[in-house]
Image: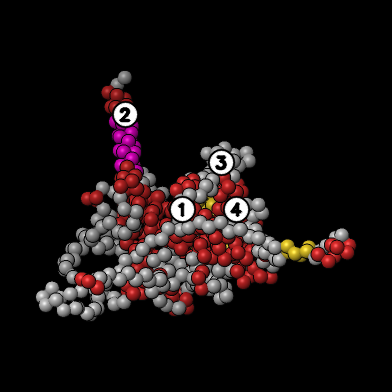
């Protein structure tokens, strides 16, 4: 082999090794990104607030400028005035029990002169006393009446019974108040039945979880499902909705293993709806057919994340979620070493999105018509610049979190830009995601549903509980009210039981000033 051939072979070998080194280096950097993201998810804050301190240039993607100097920090001390009357307002609805501490008559002599002292008032303090719940057995005696004269003359007698309210479940011990309490504990407060069983036992009542599970499923499928059907009809009559889905485990599904995933689909009204409605829908899979069937007849705008099943729906204009787009750039920023974050390309992506959300906060008090106009004038030029900037990273190699974020943004562009079609639309699907959260928090406690009927019952109850809360009702009081009336309610009366009905008793309603705290 001559010298030139040897040199050529050595050169090719060096180039191959260099290529392998470059590939391995890129792979190491990729793993470092994933490690930093994993560490943040495990140990960091879940907030997506910007983690850089400098001001990022938004519209200079061609040249890399030095970061702007950090603003001077001025310490500001804010003195908040204590709101007068807050304690009185907090305690206004509670009964007051007064305990007077008075000196006995024989101890009221003055220690100086011995003369009798008179009462000149008192010092007081207040505290809240907790009275544990009580259980009472209610025996319904339906009296019967017979005619003695008819019996003497004919040997038979008519028997007349005084009417009594029907049992919630024939032959069981469950009452409207007990059923409402069990459901409120599990679905509003995320307390699974086995924990309730233990607490009932400590209080002296033996209610096993099997009975409670049967009562819950029975009452959901036979009573609350009627309300849910009305809510779905009202929901589909809207023209702006949101949709999302999350996993749920159901142990005994046909032709599926216990470890397989099922899904809870969530649909809700938009922010401009007159009456907020949240509907939960259990399905055994994440297939496109489920939103297709549920949203049959719906025509309008649908806020969603990037899941492509929603993009195939007929008569639906999908409005993408800018919060998801921002989240991708936030992950790209988090994946960088801390020293490389400031004025990075990932930081620019976050800054673009943060500017859009800052404008949305500014537009929040506007009418839909004015918001539509201002978005086109102020927000759209920024999003256009963001899409143009993101094109620089399309198909880039090696692929990293920044490239993934840019490609996700560009892939979702047709849906993200639909927010500019109507001033009533929202910049994110966060409203629906907040409605998914109660289900997710409950799932962390009760873990799974045993059967499809149980999963369906949970969907029905979450629908009632969360829609009630959205309409300013107390879930327990509303459920109790429903169970007192639904067993004997006529079809024509169901409309009057919906959570926004003005005729609902005042006890069902949450104090307006305390709704946000609840």
Q: Is residue 237 shown in magenta?
A: no
- Mark 4 lies on residue: 173
- In the image, which is nearer the foreground, mark 4 or mark 1? 4
Asked if the residue under mark 4 is in contact with the one under mark 2, i.e. CB atoms within 8 Å, the reply is: no
Separation of marks 2 and 3 at Cα, in angstroms: 57 Å
Instruction: Report the span colored magenta.
Output: 11-34
Residue at the left extreme? Answer: 112
Vertical relation: 145 (above or below) 196: below
Is tag 4's residue or tag 1's residue first in the polypeptide sequence?
Answer: 4
**Quadrant assignment for the C terminus:** bottom left
- In the image, which is nearer the foreground, mark 2 or mark 4? 4
- In the image, which is nearer the foreground, mark 2 or mark 3? 3
- Mark 1 lies on residue: 190
Separation of marks 2 and 4 at Cα, in angstroms: 83 Å
Is tag 2's residue or tag 3's residue first in the polypeptide sequence?
Answer: 2
- Mark 2 lies on residue: 13
Picture coordinates of residue 70 (x, y %)? Answer: 19, 63
Separation of marks 1 and 2 at Cα, in angstroms: 63 Å
Mark linked to residue 251: 3
């Amino acid at each position: 082999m001559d010298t030139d051939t040897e040199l050529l072979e050595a050169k090719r070998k060096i180039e191959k090794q260099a290529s392998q080194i470059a590939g391995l280096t890129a792979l190491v950097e990729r793993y470092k990104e994933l490690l930093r993201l994993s560490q943040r998810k495990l140990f960091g804050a879940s907030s997506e607030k910007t983690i850089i301190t400098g001001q990022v240039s938004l519209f200079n993607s061609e040249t890399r400028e030095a970061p702007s100097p950090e603003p001077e920090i001025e310490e500001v001390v804010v003195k908040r005035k204590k709101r007068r009357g807050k304690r009185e307002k907090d305690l206004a609805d509670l009964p007051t029990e007064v305990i007077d501490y008075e000196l006995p008559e024989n101890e009221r002599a003055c220690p100086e002169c011995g003369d009798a002292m008179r009462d000149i008032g008192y010092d007081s303090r207040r505290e809240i006393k907790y009275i544990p719940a009580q259980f009472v057995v209610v025996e319904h005696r339906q009296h019967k009446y017979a005619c003695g004269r008819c019996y003497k003359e004919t040997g038979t007698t008519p028997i007349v019974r005084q009417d009594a309210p029907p049992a919630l479940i024939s032959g069981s011990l469950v009452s409207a108040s007990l059923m409402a309490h069990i459901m409120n504990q599990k679905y509003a407060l995320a307390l699974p039945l086995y924990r309730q069983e233990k607490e009932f036992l400590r209080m002296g009542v033996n209610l096993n979880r099997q009975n409670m599970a049967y009562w819950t499923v029975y009452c959901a499928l036979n009573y609350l499902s009627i309300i849910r059907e009305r809510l779905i009809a009202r929901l589909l009559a809207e023209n702006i909705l949101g949709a999302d889905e999350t996993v749920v485990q159901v142990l005994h599904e046909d032709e599926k293993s216990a470890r397989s995933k099922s899904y809870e689909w969530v649909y809700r009204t938009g922010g401009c709806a007159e009456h907020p409605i949240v509907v939960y829908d259990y399905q055994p899979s994440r297939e496109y057919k489920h939103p297709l069937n549920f949203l049959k007849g719906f025509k309008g705008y649908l806020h969603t994340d990037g899941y492509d099943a929603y993009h195939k729906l007929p008569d639906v204009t999908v409005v993408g979620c800018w919060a998801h787009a921002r989240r991708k750039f936030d992950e790209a920023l988090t994946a960088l070493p801390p020293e490389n974050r400031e004025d990075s390309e990932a930081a620019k992506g976050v800054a673009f999105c943060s500017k859009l959300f800052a404008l949305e906060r500014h537009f929040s008090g506007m009418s839909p018509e004015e918001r539509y106009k201002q978005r086109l004038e102020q927000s759209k030029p920024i999003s256009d610049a963001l899409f143009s900037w993101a094109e620089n990273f399309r198909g880039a190699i090696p692929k990293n979190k920044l490239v993934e974020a840019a490609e996700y943004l560009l892939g979702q562009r047709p849906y993200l830009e639909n927010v500019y079609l109507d001033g009533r639309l929202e910049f994110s699907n966060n409203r629906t995601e907040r409605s998914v959260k109660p289900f997710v928090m409950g799932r962390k406690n009760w873990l799974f549903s045993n059967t499809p009927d149980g999963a369906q019952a949970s969907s029905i109850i979450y629908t009632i509980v969360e829609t009630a809360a959205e309409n300013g009702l107390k879930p327990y009081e509303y459920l109790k009210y429903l169970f007192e009336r639904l067993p004997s309610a006529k079809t024509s009366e169901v409309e009057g039981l919906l959570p926004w009905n003005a005729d609902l008793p005042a006890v069902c309603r949450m104090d307006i000033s305390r709704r946000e705290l609840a």
